[in-house]
Amino acid sequence: MMIHTDHETDAPEISGMIGGTLRVKPGTKAVISAMINRDLILASGVEADLTGMVQNNVYLNGGTLAGKGLIGGDILQEGKL
């Protein structure tokens, strides 16, 4: 599945290709195996396991990120709420 715009989700598993930014809703536990062409933005309480790729930055915003995925930019504590 290819999503061409920014997308917000609370799905437990996210895969495919996202042509925009992915925002993960507060309190979500997710395995992210997608290729994200822009940023990954987490919210407070999110527990994400990244096995895919984020081309730009990851914004934690109180969430946590684990896994062995690839990140092309930086992991930032806050931003892009």
Image (spheres, rainbow, N blue to C red):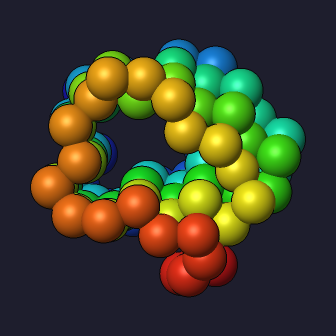
Relative to residue 38, is residue 81 depicted above or below? below
Left or right position of 79 against 35 = right
From this viewpoint, is residue 76 visible? yes
Query: Which quarter of the rendered picture does the C terminus lie within?
Result: bottom right
Relative to residue 53, is residue 43 depicted above or below? below
- Residue at 23 percent across and 48 percent down: it is 71
- Residue at 70 percent across and 50 percent down: it is 63
Which one is nearer the viewer's eye here, 4 or 54?
54
x and y percentages locating residue 28 in the rendered image = 75, 35
- Residue at 58 percent across and 70 percent down: it is 77
Left or right position of 33 against 72 = right
Which one is nearer the viewer's eye here, 15 or 51?
51
Relative to residue 58, is residue 47 depicted above or below? above
Left or right position of 11 against 34 = right
For the image, the number of numbered tags is 0
From this viewpoint, is residue 25 visible? no
x and y percentages locating residue 15 in the rendered image = 35, 22
Q: Quadrant of residue 48?
A: top right
x and y percentages locating residue 52 in the rendered image = 26, 27
